[in-house]
Image (cartoon, helix red, strand yellow):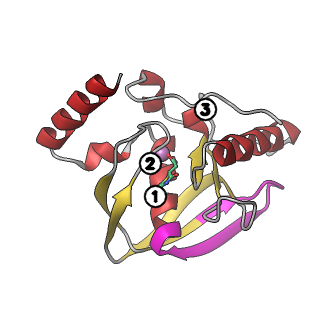
């Protein structure tokens, strides 16, 4: 078990594009386990490999914060989106910033699980939002990228004050 270091905005490595996992191996499963440990330790509901400086398309999610329903998405692909929903989002890579972000309300995602098996799942509400937030991370995108330049400016000021 290892707790990995989470990159903090404005670290440029958060902007890297993750590569697909070619073979789901024991190494991949080790990364998944470390990511769950890191996510639970930091009380997050999701974590993308990009956030722990691993440039591979790996996501872990558990909305319950406590081993209730672990979801692993390797090489995820959102194949369908419907509806619109907005909640106040936060990100372990941008501590103390909380903003309302528009997302799709329902998504269908195709991915591989930790055994390398293909699966498809439908998600709505918080799970759908979390999947979109994490898939964005794998593309180097952060939730604050959806905000206006003025709001981003204010966030930069707040981060400066906090540090
Ligand atoms: O822990 C997290 N909570 C959260 C709340 C609303 C929308 C998205 C999230 S994901 C976030 C953890 C994180 O930074 N994942 O990348
Ligand atoms: Ni995040």
Contact (CB < 8 A) between labels 1 and 2? Answer: yes
Q: Residue furthest front?
A: 162
Tell me the magenta residue range. 110-127
Label 3 or label 1, whichever lies nearer to me, is: 3
Task: Choose the circle earlier in sequence order: 3 or 2.
Answer: 3
Query: In this orientation, which residue lies closer to the viewer: 112 or 8?
Result: 8
Which x, y percent locates residue 136?
Answer: 44, 48
Which x, y percent locates residue 7?
Answer: 52, 28
Left or right for 104, reference 109: left
Query: In this orientation, which residue lies closer to the viewer: 56 or 79?
Result: 56
Q: Residue at x 11, y 40 (%)?
A: 150
Q: Mark 2 highlights which residue?
A: 136
Task: Choose the circle earlier in sequence order: 3 or 1.
Answer: 3
The image quarter containing residue 21 is top right
Q: Residue at x 45, y 53 (%)?
A: 133
Q: Secondary structure at mark 3?
A: helix
Q: Is residue 51 above or below residue 161?
A: below
Q: Mark 3 highlights which residue?
A: 52
- Mark 3 residue crowding within 10 angstroms, few (<14) / some (14–19) / many (20+): many
Left or right for 72, reference 87: right
Which x, y percent locates residue 25?
Answer: 85, 42
Q: Is residue 67 above or below residue 4?
A: below
């Amino acid at each position: 078990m290892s707790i990995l270091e989470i990159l903090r905005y404005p670290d440029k490595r958060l902007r890297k594009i993750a590569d697909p996992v070619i073979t789901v191996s024991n190494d991949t499963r080790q990364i998944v386990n470390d990511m769950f440990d890191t996510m639970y330790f930091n009380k997050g509901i999701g974590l993308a490999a990009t956030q722990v400086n691993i440039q591979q398309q790996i996501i872990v999610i558990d909305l319950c914060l406590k081993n209730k329903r672990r979801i692993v998405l390797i090489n995820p692909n959102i194949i369908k989106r419907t509806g619109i929903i907005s909640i106040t989002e936060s990100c372990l890579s941008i501590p103390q910033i909380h903003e309302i972000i528009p997302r799709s309300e329902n998504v269908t995602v195709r991915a591989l699980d930790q055994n390398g098996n293909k699966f498809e799942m439908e998600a709505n509400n918080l799970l759908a939002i979390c999947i979109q937030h994490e898939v964005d991370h794998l593309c180097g995108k952060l939730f604050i990228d959806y905000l206006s330049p003025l709001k981003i400016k204010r966030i930069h000021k707040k981060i400066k004050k906090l540090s």
